Image (cartoon, rainbow, N blue to C red):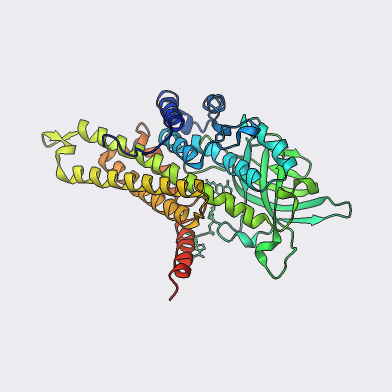
Amino acid sequence: MTRLAQTLGLTEFQTEIVSTVRHFVDKEVIPTAQELEHSDTYPQAIVDQMKDMGLFGLMIPEEYGGLGESLLTYALCVEELARGWMSVSGVINTHFIVAYMIRQHGTDAQKQKFLPRMAIGETRGAFSMSEPELGSDVAAIRTRAKKNDDGTYTIDGQKMWLTNGGSSTLVAALVRTDEGADKPHRNLTAFLVEKPTGFGEVVPGLTIPGKLDKLGYKGIDTTELIFDGYRASADDVLGGVTGQGFFQMMDGVEVGRVNVSARACGVGIRAFELAVRYAQQRETFGKPIAEHQAVAFQLAEMATKVEAAHLMMVNAARLKDSGERNDVAAGMAKYLASEFCSEVTQQSFRIHGGYGYSKEYEIERLMRDAPFLLIGEGTSEIQKNIISKRLLSDYRV
Ligand SMILES: Cc1cc2nc3c(=O)[nH]c(=O)nc-3n(C[C@H](O)[C@H](O)[C@H](O)COP(=O)(O)OP(=O)(O)OC[C@H]3O[C@@H](n4cnc5c(N)ncnc54)[C@H](O)[C@@H]3O)c2cc1C
């Protein structure tokens, strides 16, 4: 093994596209990421090139104009993108989840309407479950859609933390429709909400107030969304049937977890690359710091974590691609990869000494990006809930 995070058994196409994305990241993303991040500038030129490469349609079936690739191909491309800049991988993340949900659960009309435009990145997806009062506890959603006599719905409430909230044109929003009072999860419905890009009251009854100011993950817009008497039609209900939203969104989140683990792998790989280079350049006490065993051992630990996270991510993606249930594998991959990513960036930061604290060095950005991976698509505690519940059921005494 000469390099970390190699994947055995890839098709010719997978090898080619992953290497194309890697080359693109080295040439176009890494050299500009620091500047765009620090000025909190949307990476439009990078996004345009991602569109040209077909990355927005990677997993959309060929019959709808996409590349019809597997979750594994998608995850390996995301790993490469996140290695360059986590925000760039965030641009396609919510888009990919929404396209996946429409593909899996949409009506024929919804597939025909949205997937071809999503495949070329003309329609861009955002995914909205969280609200100001809740994130983990999805069943507690308060935003409500009330059915009107003419069959339309009026939606009121506030959503929080929409990645790509301003730059998207299609939001899959989970709201309460209250049909199965005794079964809280049956009370939720996913609506496909079309809107223009931008901020303010973008359509009557729907406001995107502005970008939230975050610790890291800059460049990409994360927003609130306010429904105030927004009118949705019955055709906007994902799959055409109310009360299915929780299960549809959880299916989306499950592939999203593989995607977050891929991002964690990418950030971890970059943190390792920076550390292994710096450790051979920086000298103390007459020799490169890599020759001090304490530092060399750190590198060994980091590389082992990077490798383990990559293998679990690949395993979870392959399981989903094979049609098997992958909730535990995706939860484990997300949990392990994000925790290891956090540890590896911290180790790389320490190896950089004082320079790690300087905004001139890439590692400071990675230190700010890594914590989000512990939270997004379910915190580590939520992953452990999912994993332990299934284990206790499968290993029941
Ligand atoms: C930058 C960013 C982008 C995001 N993008 C999106 C997006 O695009 N769409 C979207 O819908 N959401 C998005 N989110 C929201 C994200 O999914 C939530 O923040 C996350 O699910 C956690 O929810 P919370 O913040 O409400 O924390 P809470 O649910 O309030 O949890 C707080 C703490 O309590 C712990 N906890 C909660 N319940 C339990 C339990 N049962 N057992 C043990 N511990 C528990 C949690 O692990 C956490 O440590 C984003 C968040 C951020 C920061």
Residue 125: quadrant of the picture: top right
Where's residue 17, x and y in %? 46, 29
> Is residue 70 left or right of 111 when viewed as pictured?
left
Where's residue 14, x and y in %? 45, 33
> Is residue 318 left or right of 116 when viewed as pictured?
left
Question: In the depicted view, which residue is nearer to us: 27 or 350?
Answer: 27
Q: Residue furthest bottom?
A: 397
Please, is residue 290 above or below residue 122 in the view? below
Please, is residue 247 above or below residue 104 in the view? below
Q: Residue furthest left?
A: 286
Q: Is residue 294 visible?
A: yes
| Residue at 64 percent of width and 62 percent of height | 140
Question: In the depicted view, which residue is nearer to us: 330 or 338?
Answer: 330
Name the image quarter holding the N terminus.
top left
> Is residue 173 left or right of 351 when viewed as pictured?
right
| Residue at 53 percent of width and 48 percent of height | 255
Question: In the depicted view, which residue is nearer to us: 42 or 317?
Answer: 317
| Residue at 45 percent of width and 24 percent of height | 28
